[in-house]
Image (cartoon, rainbow, N blue to C red):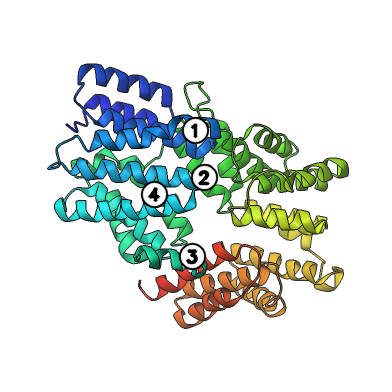
Amino acid sequence: MYDFTPRCQQAYDAIMQLRISTGLQILQEEKAANPNNLIPYFLENYADFFQLFFNEDPAFYAKRKKMRAERLTLMEEGPSDSPFYLYTQAAIKFQWALVKVKFGEKWDAVWEIRKTYTILKENQKKFPSFVPNNLMVGALQTVFGTIPEGYKWITNILGLRGSIKQGMQNVQLAVDSNAPSALLFKEESYYYYCYLKLFIENKPEQVWQLVHDKQLDTKNNYLFALMVANLSMNNQKALQGIKVLTERNHSPEYLDITYEYYVLGQLKLARLDDDATAYLEKFVSRFKGRFYVKEALQRLSWGHYIKGNTAEANKYRAMILTRGGTETDADKQALKEAKAGTWPNVLLLRVRLLSDGGFYPEALKLLQGKKAADFATTPERLEYAYRLGRIYDEMNYDQNAIGMYEVTARLGANRSEYFAARSCLQLGYIYEKRGDKTAAQLWFQKCLDMEGHDYKNSLDQRAKSGILRINGN
């Protein structure tokens, strides 16, 4: 049977807060009290998922991956007339798909996602009022709708079709619903909502509105603390991210997550804090996975470089060549910079970091009295124009921003730096905000048309999302 008892709900809440050992202990009590209940085995998958997804420990993966098949077999033993029969199988497959991506098993992950989607669609037909279906289907539809052209062949082979509009409607339904099945997974729905709203829909104000309205407990829910800090890092809100991670409950009951040092190090570097390098060093010395390592080493080398510690800067840059993977655009770019062997202009690097953290007046002050001709190389002059454009943009000086972005887009169109493509993307956002759909589409398309630059996949995904949004898809 699938019985989400009060004890199961308590265990699920603990696991979702990353109090993993507490959650597992409660599940053991539930198994003893209700030996025929399958939900504890389903929830144990969440515990494995969080540990594997965040810490990427190959030894732990080798030990736990057999549990996927065992749990799926158990779920198939339950009554097929329950909405949980297919839903639990789909959720387990989806969680393992995300884990497999982390461990380089991309094809397995892609097929796993296809199976997840097929099972969920079948469950939706059988149980249309079971809201968790909408949440997961919606998340997948939204992401499928924005697959960059370079990966389109995968979705074509798998027969996956997406729509941002339809997908986000499904996710919103789960967030807003008070149906008993929706309330079970409510906090999970907030997690999906926030990431999709920021990275796919580019609506940060709605993310922060939800965080505020739902009063997400970033003090005692470590998962929410990590989420808000990560979203802050990606939305120029370093102060907020630092506050959340330093003020969270640091009880040993919570899972030990090395990834936190990466986020906190990045946020502190954006504020030019002296101790930023200490956090990044903790991350690269303790992390056992492949994601973010090259980028963290790059940031670490920058942290030492702007402090004038050339030997340390060179030491960490050399490590980029041998440590970590190149699955993310940021890791790829870090490797490219390390191979090139040139250092960024130190003034522009400070401006970049401050701007990335949301410290716009401080960044702008550094550029006062400067002009493009003061910089020695074409990449530096391009970066100067782009950085100035971004600062103006974020400070709502739209006309000034448009001028700088247009210059950057024109002069950097055929270069490998990302400044021109990102300028086109930002111009698209400005015109989208103004309701000028024609101009927005033109600039999003220009971003897509630019080839051979850094961060190509992630910028293409955002530009494609923009085009789909303004066309109502």
Left or right side of 464 for 303: right
Question: Alpha-carbon neighbours of circle 4 within 10 Å: few (<14), some, or many (≥20)?
Answer: some
Question: Alpha-carbon neighbours of circle 3 within 10 Å: few (<14), some, or many (≥20)?
Answer: few
- Frontmost of labels 4 and 3 is 3
Give the Cα separation between the discs numbered 3 and 1.
29 Å
| CB within 8 Å, label 3 to label 1 | no
User: Residue drawn at (68%, 74%), measured in percent from left and top?
Assistant: 404
Q: Which of the marked residues, 1 or 2, is nearer the chain's N terminus?
A: 1
Residue 62, disc: 1
Question: Secondary structure under badge 2?
Answer: helix
Question: Secondary structure under badge 3?
Answer: helix
| CB within 8 Å, label 1 to label 2 | no
Q: Which residue is mark 4?
A: 192
Residue 416 image offset from top left, x and y in percent: 70, 69
- Frontmost of labels 3 and 1 is 1
Give the Cα separation between the discs numbered 3 and 2.
18 Å
Give the Cα separation between the discs numbered 1 and 4.
28 Å
Please indicate, yes or no, whether residue 52 appears anywhere in the rendered image: yes
